[in-house]
Amino acid sequence: MSVDAIGLSANLLKAVKACGYKNLTPIQQQAIPMIRSGFDLLASAQTGTGKTAAFSLPILDALAKISSSSEASADESGQNIRALVLTPTRELAAQVAENMKAYSQFLPLKIGVVYGGGKMASQTNLLKQGVDVLVATPGRLLEHLNLRNVNLSQVKFLVLDEADRMLDMGFLADIEKLNQAVKHKHQTLMFSATYSNKVKSLANQLLTTPKILGVAKQNSTSGKIKQSVYWVSEARKRELLSELIGVNNWQQVLVFAGTKESANILAKELKLDGIKAAICHGDKTQGARNKALSDFSEGKVRVLVATDVAARGLDIENLAYVVNFHLPFLAEDYVHRVGRTGRAGKSGTAISLVSPKDERFLGNIEELIGRQFERIIVPGYELKKDEALEHQQIIEKRASKNRYRASQEKNQAIAKKKQTARLSNKKYNVKIKKKR
């Protein structure tokens, strides 16, 4: 469907086309009419499918119409925030705000953003001057709310972007407090890459008779992302990574490490191999993280080594390669990581370097996304005999545990069946006695 077909106001449509939009993605086609109709919404879609535009366009269109009507005069010097977008990370907050500024470039609307790591004084000044749309991380916004720097009582649209990630990061209490501060009758929109029980529970708490929207198989990865698993010992992962990058002449590779410490070590070792690398994780200042992302996007460095703090919010145009140097602890994070490539319908490649100790994490991922990976072994990187033996023992132990669990479940089912039969006989005997 063309962007011309949904009836956006002239200035909004002009901005959308200036951003290069021609056709709507499936999530945009389905979500925009629902939002315009005033329904609360719980939407589940793969990362990279255009969720930001799906909620931004109808909200900006509605706010632009309000700002030009008599209702706008009720505002106190334009300081009332009318739309609030909550995101889990600084990077995602900055990205969403940047997109919304681009969409509203020809509209009389002001977009603001606040997140941890930014200067409180400048953020306070921004809030005091007033914004129409505020994009924020929950923790930092709650700080401003407690300091009475911000008024949320007139919010008409509340958006929770990447709701599952916010819950995983422990923001539930903050979200609940912020929701209480939004006193005005408002429309709540929840967008999530995965649709967990925690997300459903929060939706039941915050949404009123919502529309449920899922445009793709839940917890799945894009079919345009080529996914591979390379079987290698833990000690030789970095060596294999350097070889893959060098031999294949990869120019832009996002690599996920398990911890901040391992990210630092890996970036240092890649530099020693002659591969320019930058680092993005929670211990880096916001300025350092922004510079790392900028250098990576502009091709000044070939590799960006990141932790899961960057798994959401990074929107690097035409990113071709994502590498899991360490598999994530949560299988859902695999979906978010590989979703950094193959965005907006483009193709991409996701590679996981897996050692025997990663086997259980890989098993969880395979179960989640519903596919089995072939373990590719690069010649010269075969496991040593002791490593292969250790892995075989792990497999046999797991198989034994599975057999035990299956036997246990079978015995429990038999016992339950016998108990049901006894109860039925007991009830039958009671009926017979009553008849007599």
Image: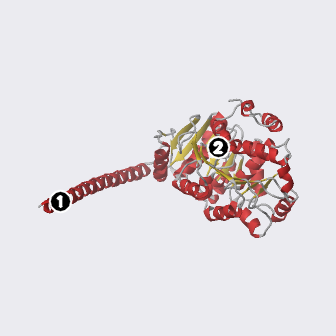
Looking at the figure, which quarter contains the N terminus?
Answer: top right
Q: Secondary structure at mark 2?
A: loop
Residue 94 visible at all:
yes
Closer to the camera in the image, 189 or 355: 189
Label ID, residue 96: none
Density class for disc 2 (Cα within 10 Å; few <14, some 14-19, many ≥20) is many
Horizontal arrangement in the rendering, residue 9 relative to residue 304 (left or right) = right
- In which quadrant of the rendered view does residue 8 lie? top right
Q: Is residue 138 above or below residue 190?
A: below
How many marks on residues? 2
Q: Residues within 10 Å of mark 1 (few under 14, many from 20)?
A: few
- Give coordinates of residue 278: x percent, y percent: 72, 50
Reply above or below: 396 against 419. Answer: above
Near-viewer residue (307 or 83): 83
Quarter holding the C terminus?
bottom left
Q: Which mark is residue 340?
A: 2
Element under disc 1: helix
User: Vertically, is 348 above or below 56?
Assistant: above
Q: Which residue is at 71% across, 29% downward?
A: 2
| Relative image position of residue 227 (x, y in whole percent) | 55, 38
Badge 1 amino acid: Lys
Q: Percent position (x, y) of residue 3?
A: 73, 32
Let me know if residue 315 appears in the view: no
Q: Amino acid at mark 2?
A: Arg
On the image, the x and y values in percent for residue 408 come to 29, 56
Residue at the spot of label 1: 431
Depth check: 130 or 399 in front?
A: 130
